[in-house]
Image (cartoon, grey):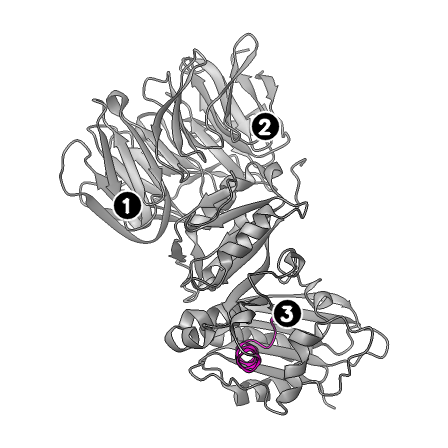
Amino acid sequence: MSEALTQIPVTVLTGYLGAGKTTLLNRILSENHGKRYAVIVNEFGEIGIDNDLIVESDEEIYEMNNGCVCCTVRGDLVRVVEGLMRRPGRFDAIVVETTGLADPVPVAQTFFMDEDVRKKTKLDAVVALVDAKHLPLRLKDSREAEDQIAFADVVVLNKTDLVTPDELRDVEAAIRAINPAAKIHRATRAGVDLGEVLDRGAFDLKRVLDNDPHFLDADDHDHVCGPDCDHDHDHHDHHHHDHHGHGPVSPIHDVTVQSVSLRGREMDSKKFFPWIEKVTQLEGPNILRLKGIIAFKDDPDRYVIQGVHMIMEGDHQRAWKDGEKHESRLVFIGRDLDEERLRKSFEACQVAA
Amino acid sequence: MPTVAPLDLDGHCVAAVFLADIPHFALADGSIHRLDHGHKTVQANDGLLCATLDLTGTKLITGGEDGKVFSTGPDDAADIVAEAGRKWITSVAAGPQGALAYGAGRNAWVKLPDGKLKEFSHPRSVEGLAFAPKGLRIGVARYNGATLHFPATDGKPTELEWAGAHTGITFSPDGNFLVTTMQENALHGWKLADGKHMRMSGYPAKVKSLSWSAKGKWLASSGAPAAIVWPFQAKDGPMGKAPLELGTRGNTMVTCVACHPSEDIAAIGYDDGMVLAVRFADAKEVLLRRPGKGAITALMWDKAERRIVFGSASGDCGVIDISA
C-alpha cells in the first residue's frame, strides 16, 4: 500500500476555565516552531487566530456496549479525526482541547478503543494546565480538577506569579500527591517551552522512560543528582525528598485521588501477567492510570506497561544496562485503591530472593 | 471481460457517482472531477466530508468543513445551497421533490421542496441523516437510537431507542425498515410498523457501507472479510436468519458495497482496492478490478447496468465497463 502509515501524534490539553488553555493554544498556533497543528476545540471562543484547521466540535461521550463499565469514547473525535485524516498533508499533529469540566478519560480511550482512529493517530501526551492561584479551591469543589491532574503526563503549573513561594510549594506538593508520575512545569502566562508539551511520546512505551529517566523515582533517596542528570531540578525533584517513607502527602485536603507506588525485585512473568490482568479487570474502574517498569527473571530487557482503566499495554523497551538494578516499579493512580492488598499481591509475583 | 478506465487523482475519494449518467468523483479536498471525453474539475467545498446524489441523479449534494452545502450539476457548476456557520457539515441527505437535509453538530436542517428551512435541535450530535422513500420524513442517527421527524408538519418526532452510538442511517426502499450503523461493530434495525428490534452483529470491523438490493430484498454491508448480505424479504426482516457471506477473502476486508440496480448481484470493494461482482444466488464471483493503491471508498452502478464507477482512499479511481 502506498498510503503512509505514519500515525499523527495527538496532544490532549485539559484544564479548568481560566487556567490558560487558550493562551497556550494561541502560542501553539502562532509561534514559529516549524510544525502545523490541527486543533479541535469545543468552542472557537477566544482563539484569536484565523486558521482553517481549528475545528469546533461538541464533546460527545459515548459508552460502548461491550460490557466494560468504564469504556467510553469521544464520538465527535472519531468523526473529526476521520475527516482530518482524509487530507493528512495539511498538518503534522493534532491538539485536542477539552472543556474545563471534561473528563480526560474518554478522550484518551478514543485513541485506544477506536480501530480507525488508532490506525491513523497515536496519543502523544495528556497535558493539564493548572492555575496556581485557584487550584486549592478547584480541588475542593470539583472532582474533575483532580481527575485532570491524576490523568496527566505533563502538568503546566501556570500563573505562578500570582502566588507566594509558600503557596506555590503547597500547590506543587498537592499535584505531586495526586500524580507522582507527571512532569510538572512552572509557568507564567502559559509560557512553558512548547517542546515540553508537544511531541512528548508519553504513551509511547519505547520512549516514555527515555524522556524521564527518573520516572517513578519518587521515593528514591539514594539518587544523587549529578552533572548528567537531565531532569528539572527546580520543578521536579526536591519535593520528593521532603516526604520520606510514605510518599508525598497533599497539604491541601479534599483530595480523593491517591497513588500507590510499588517496588520489588525481579518478577515471575507467569505470576505477574495473570495478576495485573486480574487487577485491571477488577479495579479498572478505580484506576485512572498505571505505569510501570518490570524486571522479569531471565529477561535481558526492561518491560514497560501502562494502562487507562481496564485498557493495558505492555512491551519490551530496551536492554537493562550494565550495573543497572533489576528492579520492578509500578504506580497506580486512582481512587479507593487498597494499597496493602496491591502491595502484597504485587510482592507475591516476585521470584524467590 | 470487464475493462477498467482508470482515473488517478490525488486524494481521498468521498463519492464516485454517475451524475446525469456521467462519471464524477468528489475528493476530500472538495474538487469534483468529471470524466467524459476528457477530465474536467470544479471546486465545491473547502474540505468535503459527505456527499449524496439527489433523487433525479442530476445533482451531487456535498457538505464540508467550510460549513456549506454545495449542489453540483453535470454542467460543471457548483452552487452553494445552504450554510450552517463554522461547524463542519458531517452529513447530507436528499429527499423527494428536491428536499434536502444536512447536519452539523447537534442540529439538522431540512430544506423543504418549497424552499422553507426547518431546523431540528437534538440533545446529542446528529451522526447520520436519511429521508424515508415516501412522504417527507427524515431519520436522524444519534446516541442511543434514532429520531424521525416530519419536517412538513409540526408533529412530534418519533423516538426509536437502542443503547449505543448510532453513526449512520438508511430506510429500506419500501419504507418498512430503518437500519443504523453503530460505533461498535454492528447494525441495528427497527421494523417501523411495530418498533420491533433487529440486531445484526458479529462484524469484525465497523460497518461503513450499506446498500439495498433491487426492491429492498437484501441489505449488503461492509465490515467483514466478506460482504454480509441480510435477507429482508420476510415481514420481520432478517430476524432468525443467517446472512449471506459473499466474496470472502482471507487477507483483506470489504470496505464498500453497491447492489446492482435490478438483479441480485453486488459490486464489492476491498481494503486493497480490488473490486468483485458477486451473484447472490450461487455466490459466483467475477473480478472487476485488481488490487490498487488504496481501499475502495465509493462504488455505483449506472442505469444501463453496464458500468460501475469506483473511488479509493488513495485517489486511484476509475470506471469499470462490464459489457466489453
Mark number displayed over residue B146: 1
Residue B244, quarter of picture: top left
Q: Check contact, mark 1 vs mark 3: CB within 8 A.
A: no
User: Which residue position is annotated with label 3?
Assistant: A305
Q: In front here: B213 or A287? A: A287
User: Which residue position is annotated with label 2?
Assistant: B315
Residue A133 in the image: state x and y as whole percent: 48, 73
Left or right of A336 in this view: A85: right
Which mark is first along the chain, 2 or 1? Answer: 1
- At horizontal 53% and vertical 57% (from top left) the residue drawn is A12
Q: Residues within 10 Å of mark 3 (few under 14, many from 20)?
A: some
* Measured Cα–Cα span from mark 1 to mark 2: 33 Å
- At horizontal 57% and vertical 38% (from top left) the residue drawn is B249
A69 relative to B202, above or below: below
Which amino acid does the dot numbered 1 rest on? Ala
Residue A300 in the image: state x and y as whole percent: 80, 72
* Helix, strand or loop for disc 2: loop
Q: How many marks?
A: 3
B119 relative to A206, above or below: above
Q: Check contact, mark 1 vs mark 2: CB within 8 A.
A: no
